[in-house]
Image: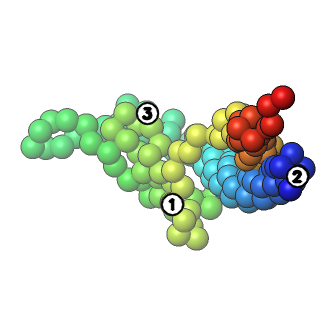
Amino acid sequence: MNLKEGTRRLALLLGVVGALLGGFVSYLELDSIMSQRVCHNRFERLASSDVVQHEHKSMAGWATIDPQTGERIPWVQQVDKGGIKTIHWTKDNEIESIETEDGQALYPTPAPAAWLYLLVVLFPILGFFIPWGAIRAIGWVGAGFFQLSQ
Protein backbone atom coordinates (compact mmCIF):
# COMPACT_ATOMS: atom_id res chain seq x y z
CA MET A 1 0.00 0.00 0.00
CA ASN A 2 1.42 3.36 -1.06
CA LEU A 3 -0.15 5.94 1.27
CA LYS A 4 1.75 8.89 -0.20
CA GLU A 5 0.72 8.22 -3.82
CA GLY A 6 -2.87 7.38 -2.85
CA THR A 7 -3.20 10.60 -0.86
CA ARG A 8 -1.78 12.63 -3.75
CA ARG A 9 -4.22 11.08 -6.22
CA LEU A 10 -7.18 11.51 -3.88
CA ALA A 11 -6.22 15.15 -3.29
CA LEU A 12 -6.04 15.80 -7.05
CA LEU A 13 -9.33 14.05 -7.71
CA LEU A 14 -11.20 15.95 -4.99
CA GLY A 15 -9.46 19.15 -6.09
CA VAL A 16 -10.77 18.72 -9.64
CA VAL A 17 -14.27 17.92 -8.35
CA GLY A 18 -14.08 21.02 -6.14
CA ALA A 19 -12.94 23.14 -9.10
CA LEU A 20 -15.88 21.87 -11.15
CA LEU A 21 -18.32 22.70 -8.33
CA GLY A 22 -16.62 26.07 -7.93
CA GLY A 23 -17.06 26.67 -11.66
CA PHE A 24 -20.76 25.87 -11.40
CA VAL A 25 -21.20 28.26 -8.44
CA SER A 26 -19.16 30.81 -10.37
CA TYR A 27 -21.51 30.50 -13.35
CA LEU A 28 -24.58 31.00 -11.14
CA GLU A 29 -23.01 34.04 -9.47
CA LEU A 30 -21.98 35.53 -12.83
CA ASP A 31 -25.53 35.05 -14.13
CA SER A 32 -26.86 36.90 -11.09
CA ILE A 33 -24.32 39.69 -11.50
CA MET A 34 -25.13 40.14 -15.17
CA SER A 35 -28.87 40.25 -14.45
CA GLN A 36 -28.28 42.90 -11.80
CA ARG A 37 -26.14 44.92 -14.24
CA VAL A 38 -28.86 44.75 -16.93
CA CYS A 39 -31.52 45.93 -14.44
CA HIS A 40 -29.26 48.74 -13.24
CA ASN A 41 -28.43 49.92 -16.76
CA ARG A 42 -32.03 49.78 -17.95
CA PHE A 43 -33.35 51.76 -14.99
CA GLU A 44 -30.54 54.32 -15.21
CA ARG A 45 -31.07 54.75 -18.94
CA LEU A 46 -34.78 55.48 -18.43
CA ALA A 47 -34.27 57.58 -15.29
CA SER A 48 -31.80 59.82 -17.09
CA SER A 49 -33.85 60.01 -20.29
CA ASP A 50 -35.13 63.34 -21.57
CA VAL A 51 -38.73 62.33 -20.83
CA VAL A 52 -38.09 61.69 -17.12
CA GLN A 53 -35.84 64.73 -16.75
CA HIS A 54 -38.51 66.93 -18.33
CA GLU A 55 -41.20 65.48 -16.03
CA HIS A 56 -38.98 65.97 -12.99
CA LYS A 57 -38.30 69.62 -13.88
CA SER A 58 -41.95 70.32 -14.68
CA MET A 59 -43.08 69.04 -11.29
CA ALA A 60 -40.43 70.90 -9.28
CA GLY A 61 -41.96 72.17 -6.08
CA TRP A 62 -45.03 69.99 -6.39
CA ALA A 63 -45.98 67.88 -3.45
CA THR A 64 -48.82 65.51 -2.86
CA ILE A 65 -50.09 66.12 0.65
CA ASP A 66 -52.15 63.67 2.68
CA PRO A 67 -55.20 65.70 3.78
CA GLN A 68 -55.50 63.84 7.08
CA THR A 69 -51.90 64.06 8.26
CA GLY A 70 -50.59 66.99 6.25
CA GLU A 71 -47.48 64.99 5.28
CA ARG A 72 -46.06 64.54 1.81
CA ILE A 73 -46.90 61.16 0.29
CA PRO A 74 -45.57 59.15 -2.65
CA TRP A 75 -47.45 59.64 -5.89
CA VAL A 76 -47.78 58.28 -9.43
CA GLN A 77 -47.41 60.32 -12.60
CA GLN A 78 -48.88 59.09 -15.88
CA VAL A 79 -46.42 59.81 -18.75
CA ASP A 80 -47.21 57.55 -21.75
CA LYS A 81 -44.24 58.57 -23.90
CA GLY A 82 -40.68 57.51 -24.55
CA GLY A 83 -41.46 53.90 -23.63
CA ILE A 84 -42.53 54.97 -20.13
CA LYS A 85 -46.10 54.47 -18.95
CA THR A 86 -45.92 55.78 -15.37
CA ILE A 87 -43.35 57.10 -12.94
CA HIS A 88 -43.75 56.37 -9.25
CA TRP A 89 -42.25 59.18 -7.17
CA THR A 90 -41.27 59.08 -3.50
CA LYS A 91 -42.38 61.79 -1.11
CA ASP A 92 -38.95 63.39 -1.66
CA ASN A 93 -39.58 63.59 -5.43
CA GLU A 94 -37.10 60.82 -6.20
CA ILE A 95 -37.92 58.01 -8.62
CA GLU A 96 -39.26 54.98 -6.78
CA SER A 97 -39.99 52.94 -9.89
CA ILE A 98 -40.70 53.28 -13.58
CA GLU A 99 -43.38 51.26 -15.33
CA THR A 100 -42.70 50.76 -19.01
CA GLU A 101 -45.30 50.60 -21.77
CA ASP A 102 -44.74 46.85 -22.05
CA GLY A 103 -45.75 46.40 -18.38
CA GLN A 104 -42.35 45.95 -16.74
CA ALA A 105 -41.65 47.69 -13.45
CA LEU A 106 -38.07 48.88 -13.05
CA TYR A 107 -36.65 49.80 -9.66
CA PRO A 108 -33.42 51.56 -8.71
CA THR A 109 -30.86 48.75 -8.60
CA PRO A 110 -27.27 49.34 -7.51
CA ALA A 111 -24.55 48.37 -9.95
CA PRO A 112 -22.77 45.15 -8.99
CA ALA A 113 -19.62 45.74 -6.97
CA ALA A 114 -16.28 45.12 -8.69
CA TRP A 115 -15.22 42.61 -6.03
CA LEU A 116 -18.05 40.30 -7.14
CA TYR A 117 -16.27 39.76 -10.45
CA LEU A 118 -13.13 38.79 -8.53
CA LEU A 119 -15.21 36.37 -6.49
CA VAL A 120 -16.45 34.73 -9.71
CA VAL A 121 -12.84 34.07 -10.69
CA LEU A 122 -11.88 32.82 -7.23
CA PHE A 123 -14.65 30.20 -6.85
CA PRO A 124 -13.05 27.56 -9.12
CA ILE A 125 -9.58 28.28 -7.69
CA LEU A 126 -10.81 27.94 -4.11
CA GLY A 127 -12.87 24.94 -5.17
CA PHE A 128 -9.66 23.21 -6.16
CA PHE A 129 -7.30 24.30 -3.39
CA ILE A 130 -9.59 23.82 -0.37
CA PRO A 131 -10.24 20.07 -0.83
CA TRP A 132 -6.75 19.50 -2.27
CA GLY A 133 -5.11 21.20 0.72
CA ALA A 134 -7.39 19.47 3.22
CA ILE A 135 -6.62 16.00 1.85
CA ARG A 136 -2.90 16.77 1.69
CA ALA A 137 -2.96 17.99 5.30
CA ILE A 138 -4.94 14.97 6.51
CA GLY A 139 -2.60 12.66 4.58
CA TRP A 140 0.46 14.37 6.04
CA VAL A 141 -0.87 14.02 9.60
CA GLY A 142 -1.99 10.43 8.97
CA ALA A 143 1.38 9.50 7.51
CA GLY A 144 3.00 10.64 10.74
CA PHE A 145 1.09 7.96 12.65
CA PHE A 146 1.95 5.15 10.27
CA GLN A 147 5.66 5.77 9.61
CA LEU A 148 8.00 3.18 11.00
CA SER A 149 10.32 4.56 13.63
CA GLN A 150 13.96 3.55 13.36
Q: Which residue is mark 1?
A: 105
Above or below for 121 versus 87 = above
Q: Which residue is mark 3?
A: 60
- Residue 68, image x, y percentages: 9, 43
Give the CA separation, mark 1 to mark 2: 63 Å
Give the CA separation, mark 1 to mark 3: 24 Å
The amino acid type, in three-letter code, at marker 1 is Ala
Above or below for 140 versus 104 = above
Above or below for 135 versus 148 = below
Residue closest to the eye, 59 or 102: 102
Taking the spot 47% from the left edge, 51% from the top edge, the residue there is 97
Quarter location, residue 129? top right
Residue closest to the eye, 109 or 1: 1
Q: Are marks 1 and 2 in contact (CB under 8 Å)?
A: no
Ranked by sequence position, the earlier of labels 3 and 2 is 2
Residue 2's disc is: 2
